[in-house]
Image (cartoon, rainbow, N blue to C red):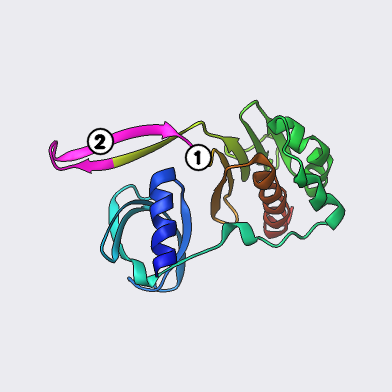
């Protein structure tokens, strides 16, 4: 439990969103994403996303999923491309654009994020990406102030500014380094395309 408590405390300090399996509550064993806020004894107060209301969880019933242990399904040769830290987001993704297109994705690139989109039958792009990688310079979090009897909002520099998400897989992870985030982004692009039968 101490390791879980340490990971939760680190997430509070960095603003990281954790994927956990909670072995309690009304749906024991269900995977969910939480944004930890504070710890007292064996209880962590966190937002169970997408809900923004704080909830209490028994730390002894929390199992933290390992976001880094995603199995890579593409070749070792491609995996070795992630060993160098790219100089920019586009630099990190440019050689995979043809792979994303072959998987059936429509790609939208900007300086701070890259999204993979499905298209409607009429050929128009959907409004929200199915798979996304992006840079978030700041982490925003709220804290309950006894003094003000309300929540106070804070912002600080992100320790893990690279975020990768997949709607299909219902996953959202963050990384300190772009190279690690890119590995997950490519994996999510494959897994999501397979799940959506693109």
Could you tell me which quadrant the N terminus lies in?
A: bottom left
70 left or right of 19 in image: right
For the residues carrying marks 2 and 1, which lies nearer the camera in this image? 1
Q: Secondary structure at mark 1?
A: loop
99 left or right of 196 in image: right
Q: Which residue is more in the foreground, 129 or 176? A: 176
Q: Dot 1: few (<14), some (14–19), or many (≥20) neighbours within 10 Å?
A: some
Q: Quadrant of residue 14?
A: top left
List the residue tagged with mark 1: 159
Q: Quadrant of residue 171?
A: bottom right
Name the mark on residue 152. Answer: 2
Q: Position of residue 173 (x, y in %)?
A: 55, 50
Residue in the picture at 69% in, 30% down: 109
How far apart are the two marked residues, 2 and 1, measured between alpha carbons? 21 Å
First along the sequence among labels 2 and 1? 2
Taking the view exactly as shown, the residue that stands out farthest to the right is: 77
Q: Position of residue 191 (x, y in %)?
A: 70, 57
Residue 8 sits inside the magenta stretch: no
Q: Is residue 53 visible?
A: yes
Name the mark on residue 30. Answer: none
Q: Secondary structure at mark 2?
A: strand
Q: Dot 2: few (<14), some (14–19), or many (≥20) neighbours within 10 Å?
A: few
Magenta residues span: 143-158
């Amino acid at each position: 439990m101490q390791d879980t408590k340490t990971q939760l405390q680190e997430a509070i300090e960095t603003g990281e969103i954790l994927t956990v399996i909670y072995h309690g509550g009304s749906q024991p064993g269900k995977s969910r994403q939480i944004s930890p806020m504070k710890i007292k004894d064996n209880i962590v107060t966190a937002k169970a996303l997408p809900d923004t209301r704080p909830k209490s969880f028994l730390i002894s019933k929390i199992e933290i999923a390992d976001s880094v242990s995603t199995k890579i399904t593409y070749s070792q040769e491609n995996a070795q491309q992630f060993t160098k830290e790219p100089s920019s987001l586009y630099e990190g993704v440019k050689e995979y654009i043809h792979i994303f297109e072959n998987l059936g994705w429509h790609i939208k690139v900007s300086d701070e994020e890259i999204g993979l989109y499905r298209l409607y039958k009429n050929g128009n792009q959907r409004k929200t990406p199915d798979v996304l990688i992006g840079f978030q310079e700041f982490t925003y979090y709220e804290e309950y102030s006894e003094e003000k009897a309300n929540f106070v909002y804070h912002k600080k520099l992100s320790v893990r500014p690279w975020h990768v998400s997949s709607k299909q897989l219902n996953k959202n992870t963050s990384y300190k380094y772009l190279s690690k985030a890119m590995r997950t982004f490519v994996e999510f692009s494959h897994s999501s395309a397979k799940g959506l039968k693109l």
